[in-house]
Image (cartoon, rainbow, N blue to C red):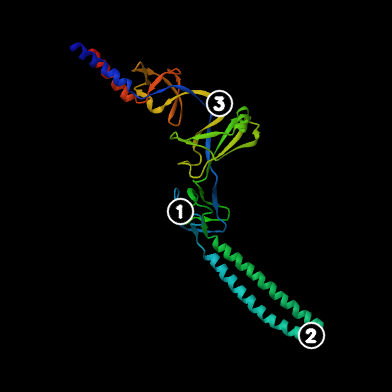
């Protein structure tokens, strides 16, 4: 009875080990990829410049601020522009008053001309004065519109919604037309540009599949892949542009990312990433042979979602324990039982 009990005690960890969840290692057909360094760019990025002269009166936005489209980001002192506007309004009022008088004179002269009470020369003179008054009114209206536009230039507005990336002026600084004021970009519309060897570009042009890998190892599938129709004669490379979906993570212009370009198909040995055990400098998995977990050191490659590629250490058909912690516990139990 003692022997039977001891045998059962010895076999119990093996029976438990046999219940470990395992997965048979098989090769999977996956895209063959070439990796390149890409640079993130903003689809909408620009520098707002001054369109009138003035002194910076108020800074409403600083670097890093999120700005809605059309919001005022900077104000200039508008004293001169307001005076010009007042003068333009007064000139228009004068032109309209003069036109009203000349309109009455023209109507009276036309009636008298129809009744042949004035000569044709006198009527032509009145008509010319009337047309001159109309032209002056039109000129005054144009001057008013221009003055209004110049006044609006003292309030600098965001051309689109985005984030301020640089401020080029200080409070109280005098600016002139063309001087840069503020730079910004739209973080919701980003793209990646990368240079490809001509041979790779020819394959990418046919397959048109790629992915962008960010710093946190997350994949972004581009909404559109564009290859430039010309090659750079200095580097013999072809530029590729990957338009990213809207709101594609925390990317910013100038950031470097990895770009995986698909150039064909290949067979890869994949296992779940959760089955990998990291112990000091050893990377391994537990394979299960006849119900017994055995630690096997492996060399890993790239990660594909929840799976990771095994470059060395495993063969097709072997069974891998999905829970390395549970497998390690079973190994310890088995070792302790054998020592007893």
Frontmost of labels 1 and 3 is 3
- Quarter of the image containing the C terminus? top left
* SS for callout 1: loop
* Residue lying farthest to the front in this orientation: 1
* SS for callout 2: helix
Q: Position of residue 333 (x, y in %)?
A: 26, 19
Frontmost of labels 2 and 1 is 2
Task: Say if 82 sits above or below 272 in the image.
Answer: below
Task: Say if 323 sits above or below 176 in the image.
Answer: above
Residue 340 seen anywhere in this rendered image of the structure:
no
Q: Nearer the viewer, residue 114 or 51?
A: 114
- Determine the CA span between mark 2 and mark 3: 93 Å
Rate crowding at label 1 as few (under 14), some (14 to 19) or many (20 or more) other CA atoms within 10 Å.
some
* SS for callout 3: strand
At 69% across and 72% down in the image, what residue appears? 135
Q: Judge from the rendering whether residue 325 lies leftward or rightward of residue 205; answer left or right.
A: left
Rate crowding at label 2 as few (under 14), some (14 to 19) or many (20 or more) other CA atoms within 10 Å.
few
At 54% across and 49% down in the image, what residue appears? 47
Q: Nearer the viewer, residue 127 or 22?
A: 22
- For disc 3, the marked residue is 265
| Contact between labelled residues 1 and 2, with CB atoms less than 8 Å apart | no
Frontmost of labels 2 and 3 is 3
Q: Quadrant of residue 92?
A: bottom right
Q: Judge from the rendering whether residue 118 lies leftward or rightward of residue 189; answer left or right.
A: right
- Determine the CA span between mark 1 and mark 3: 50 Å
Q: Position of residue 222 (x, y in %)?
A: 53, 38
- For disc 2, the marked residue is 114
Question: Counting residues from the N terminus, which is met first, the one under dot 1 or under dot 3?
Answer: 1
Return the mark for residue 61: 1
Q: Position of residue 155 (x, y in %)?
A: 51, 60
- Quarter of the image containing the N terminus? top left
């Amino acid at each position: 009875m003692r022997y039977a009990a001891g045998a059962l005690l010895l076999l119990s960890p093996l029976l438990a080990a046999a219940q470990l969840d395992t997965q048979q290692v098989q090769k999977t057909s996956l895209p063959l990829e070439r990796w390149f360094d890409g640079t993130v760019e903003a689809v909408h990025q620009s520098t707002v410049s001054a369109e009138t002269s003035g002194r910076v009166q108020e800074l409403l936005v600083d670097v890093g601020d999120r700005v809605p489209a059309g919001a005022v980001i900077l104000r200039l002192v508008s004293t001169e522009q307001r005076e010009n506007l007042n003068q333009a309004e007064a000139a228009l009022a004068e032109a309209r008053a003069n036109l009203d008088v000349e309109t009455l004179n023209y109507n009276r002269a036309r009636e008298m001309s129809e009744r042949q009470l004035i000569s044709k020369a006198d009527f032509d003179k009145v008509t010319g004065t009337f047309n001159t008054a109309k032209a002056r009114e039109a000129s005054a209206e144009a001057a008013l519109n221009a003055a209004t536009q110049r006044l609006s230039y003292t309030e600098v507005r965001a051309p689109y919604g985005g984030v301020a990336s640089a401020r080029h002026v200080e409070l109280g600084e005098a600016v002139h037309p063309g001087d840069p004021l503020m730079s910004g970009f739209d973080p919701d519309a980003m793209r990646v540009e990368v240079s490809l060897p001509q041979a790779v570009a020819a394959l990418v042009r046919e397959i048109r599949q790629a992915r962008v890998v960010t710093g946190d190892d997350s994949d972004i599938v581009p909404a559109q892949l564009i290859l430039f129709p010309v090659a750079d004669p200095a580097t013999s490379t072809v530029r590729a542009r990957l338009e990213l979906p809207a709101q594609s993570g925390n990317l910013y212009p100038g950031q470097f990312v990895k770009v995986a370009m698909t150039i064909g198909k290949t067979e890869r040995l994949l296992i779940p990433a959760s089955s990998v055990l990291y112990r000091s400098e050893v990377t391994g998995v537990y394979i299960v042979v006849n119900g017994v977990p055995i630690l096997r050191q492996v060399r890993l490659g790239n990660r594909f979602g929840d799976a990771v590629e095994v470059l060395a250490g495993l063969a097709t058909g072997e069974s891998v324990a999905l829970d390395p912690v549970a497998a390690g516990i079973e190994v310890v139990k088995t070792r302790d039982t054998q020592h007893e």
